[in-house]
Image (cartoon, coloured by chain):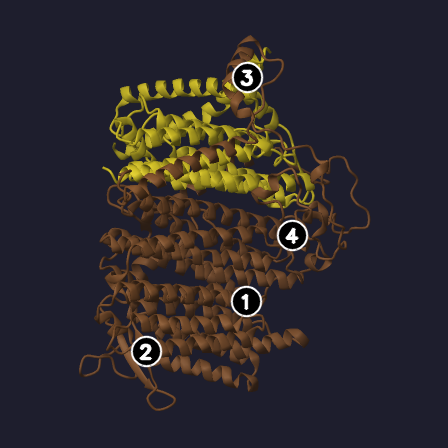
């Protein structure tokens, strides 16, 4: 893919991600309400909330410093950077050489760390306790994510997401059992992370800062969906040398994957309920165990090839 | 360096002679420190140590051969054998650089009075002796010189702080003496060049390596109980690199190809366990300096893991894997020595400014000590595993080293690699948690004491030192290939037979030609772009800001506490997963460092409700479709509801499966699962 086309693909990918984030949130809220027997909010409610919040004057506690102002921005920037690296509808975008699984995992960690630091900066009790809890959960979730990335790298012999997705697309990401275990691990991680892992960090934020925090959470969820869809369901994704027709197919398949993810998430939440804080260590522990199993199977299988 | 008429460097400009003279001058300086002003001694020590660092650069050039020196010192028949090769030059450069910073930091403090004055005097007397001893250890090419250097080091450290365990250093000296003697074949003089030249038996190589590893660990453990900032800084910047050097010398260099590969598995497991343990300790220690020191010590475990991966690659005749593992170890040493020293010095400056090291009494130091706070943040960023810090680059190399490790040997050989990857991942997350904890409690929020609110930032001298260390640390993070390509390549080539061409550019790291590598600058640029764009949009949309009081859930602020309620801020407990159980951490509110007095221990475990089940049924008012789905799921889930936790069930399954696999593997010699 030429440089200009790669840059165009990257810009289109970012535009799709940024536009899809509030739409996915609206769809999830609507469908969850419907499954619960309620009418549900309109699909555009998240966008309305953003507009409403952006019109408000932000109120900051007197004990906070500029860190509280910048923490949401840094968190959003890091999550946006991670979203930029995870392919959605096509491979071979301009940032594909940077799409290292370890880098993506670390960017998500930076986003969470920034939010925690913003909560600790307020000096208030509840935010401090929430920050402690979020950090404690991250001690479980981050190794699980790193192990998951490592298990895929063992199968693909590379940490680059584009290469891994390409091999999965061609069916050469073996062994399939390890891939299935890795998928389960990622599902557990995504389900727990999209719960209330970072709840309680933003009570002191309002106005545009609260809007930024909400957009960050939506983008983070979209990163998980893109990871699941790209790494394990790369059907329809355009190759690095694809043209406009392949891009169209890629966008259509991406939209279908988003819809499937929304339905799946809402069904699971309806059946099992939202994941509360006491349940999150178990889910992260399960994800880590499964990722470790996948790693062992992948390492053992690689010696037989 | 001008060569003499027979092609070798002239005696006046020979680096090894100059380094030996430098070490002697440091020793002399330590001896006369009682009669010289402390500042003069300190800055002279820094100058000599800096000179030693500069003298280590020429031997790192690719075309320069190793040099040797024999010093007839002491009783007849005792000759000190010194040698300078790329390996010792690289580590001496790191040790001297960090030693310069520590000596200058101590000298910039000033004389002081009373206990502070006594501490300054001890630093002035002992730091030059420590650095001289370390130079002797790193230049030694025979076990006697090595042992003398270690004994001298132990004596100097004990002189610096009584809490240092002199027996540990003495033990390490004897262990390394015996290790090198074991590695020396019969009939050969116990010198490094003779050991390399002659083949040794595998059993002696194994025993020697075991003693060397134990000696290195003992050397590091000797200072574990010390609370002296100079000891902790020297440990982070000089003693840990020295210990890793000794292990590298006795496990990789001297035994050569005789070393068996299973040693590598032991090292990666031991290193992983050590790094996880230190990371856990760092994330729960109640002191700022203690947490910082343990974060620095955590890097030693990672370096041992890299050493093990190098050995595995070497024994399997995979020079690419070996060179990548060694590159990871060397990058870790360079980055962690710098960052560890920076973190410890910054932690000391913050603690001294606020007159306490207890996390429960620290806070808001970013306002009063901005430079020291920024230095602490820079050091912690490099020690944690977040890009674009140097710690992430080293972690990246370690993961790729595991990826390149041989995939033969079945489950028994692959299980340690998987566990090593798990340990690396857990250690990285613990380091990140510990760093976030320290930054959030110490640097941010608001002060909790009068002294903390009136703390003064470091003086000009210390400011320069912190800036120099911080700049170096950030440079290594931004250009991780720079220390590898510029400094470590001769060492890697000498030990593994393969250089770092194609693996390390000036700014990039690459594991193979088939996949893109890691480059910190583009990641930094991407972060700057996204954060900058977000900041611009937020600034454009912001409708002003109003400041109000802290919302405390409607509770009135506590009277009589001019700095706010210190109990409202975190005291550093609760950042680890153990705190997620129903029992709250009883120490969290009582651990105030004597501020509110010791509260009686209260056992709340029985008064709290039982731990919530991880999976619960859905909402009661679900629609028809939701009810049907829930009933279907509960029918599947019912057997698992009897378990206390699904994780228990999965552990049981994993253990049973793992036991079965191990039994099959042992019965079949490890080949059944290939």
**Label 4 crowd (10 A; few <14 / some 14-19 / many >=20):** many
Q: Chain of mark 2?
A: B
In the rendered image, residues at marks 3 and 4 fall on the same chain: no
> Label 2 vs label 3: CA separation?
74 Å
- Image location (x, y in percent) of residue B425: 44, 45
Q: Chain of mark 1?
A: B
> Label 1 vs label 3: CA separation?
58 Å
In the rendered image, residues at marks 1 and 3 fall on the same chain: no
Residues tagged 2 and 3 counted as in contact (Cβ below 8 A): no
In the rendering, what colour is chain A?
Answer: yellow
The residue to which callout 2 is attached is B82
The residue to which callout 4 is attached is B364
Kindly tell me whether residue B426 is visible in this rendering.
Answer: yes
The answer to which of marks 1 and 4 sits earlier in the sequence is 4
Residue A247 figure quarter: top left
Residue A32: numbered disc:
3
């Amino acid at each position: 893919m030429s440089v200009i086309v790669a840059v165009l693909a990257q810009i289109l990918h970012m535009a799709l991600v940024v536009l899809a984030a509030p739409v996915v949130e609206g769809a999830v809220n609507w469908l969850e309400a419907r499954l619960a027997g309620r009418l549900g909010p309109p699909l555009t409610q998240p966008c309305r909330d953003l507009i409403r919040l952006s019109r408000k004057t932000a109120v900051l506690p007197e004990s906070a410093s500029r860190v509280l102002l910048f923490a949401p921005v840094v968190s959003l920037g890091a999550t946006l950077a991670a979203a930029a690296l995870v392919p959605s509808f096509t491979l071979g975008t301009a940032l594909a050489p940077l799409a290292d699984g370890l880098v993506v995992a670390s960017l998500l960690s930076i986003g969470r760390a920034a939010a925690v630091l913003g909560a600790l900066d307020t000096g208030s009790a509840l935010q401090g306790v929430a920050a402690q809890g979020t950090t404690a959960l991250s001690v479980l979730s981050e190794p699980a994510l790193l192990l998951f990335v490592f298990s895929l790298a063992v199968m693909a012999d590379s940490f680059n997401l584009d290469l891994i997705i390409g091999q999965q697309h061609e069916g050469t990401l073996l062994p399939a059992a390890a891939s299935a275990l890795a998928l389960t691990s990622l599902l557990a991680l995504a389900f727990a992370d999209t719960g209330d892992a970072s709840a309680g960090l933003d009570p002191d934020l309002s106005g545009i800062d609260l809007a930024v925090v909400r957009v960050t959470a939506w983008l983070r969820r979209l990163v998980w969906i893109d990871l699941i869809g790209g790494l394990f369901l790369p059907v329809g994704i355009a190759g690095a040398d694809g043209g406009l027709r392949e891009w169209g197919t890629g966008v259509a398949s991406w939209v279908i994957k988003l819809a499937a993810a929304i339905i799946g998430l809402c069904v699971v939440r309806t059946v099992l309920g939202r994941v509360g804080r006491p349940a999150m260590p178990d889910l992260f522990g399960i994800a880590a165990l499964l990722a470790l199993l996948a790693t062992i199977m992948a390492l053992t299988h690689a010696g037989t090839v | 360096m001008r060569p003499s008429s027979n092609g070798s460097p002239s005696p006046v400009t020979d680096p090894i002679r100059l380094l030996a003279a430098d070490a002697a001058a440091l020793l002399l300086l330590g001896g006369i420190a009682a009669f010289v002003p402390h500042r003069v001694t300190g800055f002279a020590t820094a100058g000599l140590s800096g000179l030693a660092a500069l003298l280590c650069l020429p031997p790192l050039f690719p075309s320069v051969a190793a040099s040797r020196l024999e010093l007839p010192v002491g009783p007849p028949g005792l000759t000190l054998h010194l040698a300078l090769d790329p390996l010792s030059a690289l580590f001496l450069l790191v040790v001297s650089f960090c030693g310069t910073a520590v000596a200058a930091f101590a000298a910039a403090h000033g004389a002081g009075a009373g206990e502070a004055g006594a501490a300054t005097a001890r630093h002035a007397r002992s730091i030059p002796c420590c650095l001289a001893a370390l130079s002797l250890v790193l230049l030694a090419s025979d076990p006697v010189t090595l042992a003398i250097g270690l004994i001298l080091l132990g004596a100097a450290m004990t002189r610096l702080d009584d809490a240092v365990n002199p027996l540990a250093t003495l033990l390490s000296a004897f262990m390394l003496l015996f290790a090198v003697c074991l590695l020396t074949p019969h009939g050969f003089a116990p010198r490094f060049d003779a050991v390399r030249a002659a083949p040794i038996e595998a059993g002696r190589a194994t025993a020697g390596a075991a003693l060397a590893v134990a000696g290195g660990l003992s050397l590091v453990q000797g200072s574990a109980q010390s609370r002296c900032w100079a000891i902790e800084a020297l440990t982070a910047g000089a003693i840990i690199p020295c210990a890793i050097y000794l292990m590298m010398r006795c496990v990789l260099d001297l035994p050569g190809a005789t070393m068996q590969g299973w040693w590598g598995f032991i090292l990666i497991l031991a290193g992983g366990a050590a790094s996880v343990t230190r990371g856990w300790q760092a994330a729960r220690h109640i002191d700022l300096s203690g947490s910082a020191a343990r974060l620095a010590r955590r890097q030693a475990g990672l370096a041992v893991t890299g050493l093990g991966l190098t050995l595995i690659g070497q024994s399997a005749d995979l020079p690419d894997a070996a060179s990548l593992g060694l590159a990871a170890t060397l990058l870790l040493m360079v980055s962690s020595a710098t960052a560890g020293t920076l973190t410890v010095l910054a932690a000391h400056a913050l603690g001294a400014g606020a007159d306490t090291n207890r996390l429960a009494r620290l806070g808001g130091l970013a306002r009063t000590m901005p430079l020291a706070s920024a230095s602490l943040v820079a050091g912690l960023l490099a020690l944690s595993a977040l890009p674009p810090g140097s710690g992430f680059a080293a972690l990246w190399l370690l993961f790729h080293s595991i990826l390149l490790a041989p995939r033969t040997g079945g489950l028994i050989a692959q299980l340690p690699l998987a566990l090593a990857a798990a340990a690396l991942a857990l250690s990285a997350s613990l380091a990140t948690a510990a760093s976030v904890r320290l930054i959030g409690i110490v640097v941010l929020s608001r002060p909790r004491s009068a002294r903390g609110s009136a703390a003064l930032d470091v003086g000009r001298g210390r400011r320069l030192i912190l800036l120099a260390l911080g700049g170096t640390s950030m440079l290594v993070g931004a250009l991780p290939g720079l220390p590898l390509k510029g400094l470590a390549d001769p060492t890697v080539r000498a030990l593994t037979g393969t250089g770092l061409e194609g693996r390390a550019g000036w700014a990039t790291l690459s594991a193979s030609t088939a996949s893109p590598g890691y480059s910190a600058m583009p990641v930094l640029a991407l972060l700057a772009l996204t954060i900058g764009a977000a900041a611009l949009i937020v600034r454009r949309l912001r409708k002003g800001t109003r400041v109000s009081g802290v919302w405390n859930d409607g509770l009135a602020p506590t009277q009589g506490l001019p700095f706010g309620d210190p109990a409202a801020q975190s005291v550093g407990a609760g950042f680890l997963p153990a705190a997620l159980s129903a029992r709250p951490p009883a120490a969290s509110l009582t651990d105030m460092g004597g501020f509110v007095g010791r509260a009686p221990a209260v056992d709340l475990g029985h008064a709290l409700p039982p731990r919530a089940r991880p999976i619960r049924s859905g909402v009661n008012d679900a629609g028809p479709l939701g009810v049907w789905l829930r009933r279907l799921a509960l029918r599947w889930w019912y057997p698992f509801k009897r378990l206390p936790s699904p994780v228990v069930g999965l552990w049981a399954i994993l253990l049973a499966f793992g036991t079965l696999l191990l039994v099959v593997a042992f019965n079949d010699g490890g080949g059944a699962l290939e």
